Amino acid sequence: MSWGLKNRLARIVKPKTGHTVMLAVDHGYFMGPTTGLEKLDKTVNPLIPYADALMLTRGALRNYIAPDSDIPIVLRVSGGTSIIGKELLREGIIASVKDAIRLNASGLAFSIMVGSEFERDTLLGLAQVVDWGEEYGIPVLAVTAVGKELGGKDKDARYLALCCRIAAELGAHFVKTYYCEDFEKVVESCPVPIVIAGGKKLPEEDALKMAYEALQAGAAGVDMGRNIFQSENPVAMIQAVKAVVHEGATPDEAYEIFKEKKGAKAAARVK
Ligand code: R5P
């Protein structure tokens, strides 16, 4: 790993705790105006002070995020398909490394579709992006997709460990996957840091518990989207998640933080 690559990775995964709170707001690349992100800047700007990195597309970055922001960017560079198209999993490269450098990206994110008929294309795509990352000193986040489309394979430790290990073997510098039972097995067999996606919106208490359990099992943090920006109070929720990730707050403590921050905002409105 070059100095530049290590330096960029240290901007995302904070050396002080070895952990990270990444905020994923890239959903529009295949889902269009996702609930909560219709006006992405309105939702995301208040969350930026609490996030360690922002994961999004180049179009969202250019249109919604101010260029004087100092939040590290993890740029989504795979896509090209949509939820209404016929080949959702047939993602390809959607942004060049030169544009990523122009955008001062701290990381590149690429989805792999292990077990799908497009597995080979996405794994070779990841390898290509890793070559760019090595050449220009930009860490690559492999995102392991899950879902019914993947031949019925879903979130079990055996499948996710397979995906994460393949991603690391192909050179990904960190991996995003989903939390599952026996998650420590996924972490143990993956030689690079793992962050978890949040998945579909859960009650806040449950999402905090999931983050806590993932950290306890050895995850380096979260790359969470809907469970933050679709929360009834996203600013309170990201602070609660941050307490779990960086301060080791238990789910109960974190939920108290959520309620307290939510309450503080409501009280400020009444004044
Ligand atoms: C997954 O492929 C994309 O990066 C998603 O947009 C993101 O991971 C979803 O995050 P969450 O599941 O926490 O909403």
Image: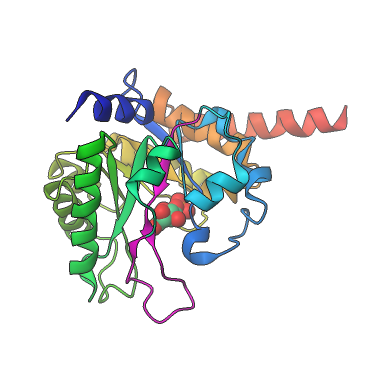
In the rendered image, the vertical position of residue 258 relative to residue 145, given as above or below: above
Dominant secondary-structure state across the stretch colored magenta = loop
Q: Can you see residue 203?
A: no
Where is residue 146? Give x, y as percent.
Answer: 32, 64
Q: Quadrant of residue 223?
A: top left
Q: Quadrant of the N terminus?
A: top left
Q: Locate residue 92 relative to residue 41 in the image: left or right.
A: left
Type of colouring: rainbow
Question: x, y (%) of residue 193?
Answer: 24, 37
Pick whichever, 194 or 252, lies toward us.
194
Question: Which residue is rendered at x = 20% and y = 43% of the image?
Answer: 187
Q: Quadrant of ligand 1?
A: bottom left
Tell me which segment is drawn in magenta.
Answer: 71-93
- Residue at the image point whose x is 15% and y is 57% from the top: 162
Q: Is residue 260 visible?
A: yes
Residue lying at the far right in this picture: please name it.
Answer: 271
Q: Is residue 214 magenta?
A: no
Position of 193 relative to 164 (above/below): above
Residue drawn at (19%, 38%) of the image: 192
* The quarter of the displayed image where residue 112 is located: bottom left
Residue 39: percent from left, percent from top = 67, 52
Position of 266 compared to 262: left or right? Answer: right
Residue 16: where, in percent of width, then height? Answer: 34, 17
Task: Identify the image quadrant of residue 111.
Answer: bottom left
Q: Nearer the viewer, residue 118 or 259?
A: 118
Q: Check the image and report above or below for 46 versus 144.
A: above
**In this image, 166 relative to 227: left or right?**
left
Return the residue nearer the eye: 48 or 241: 48
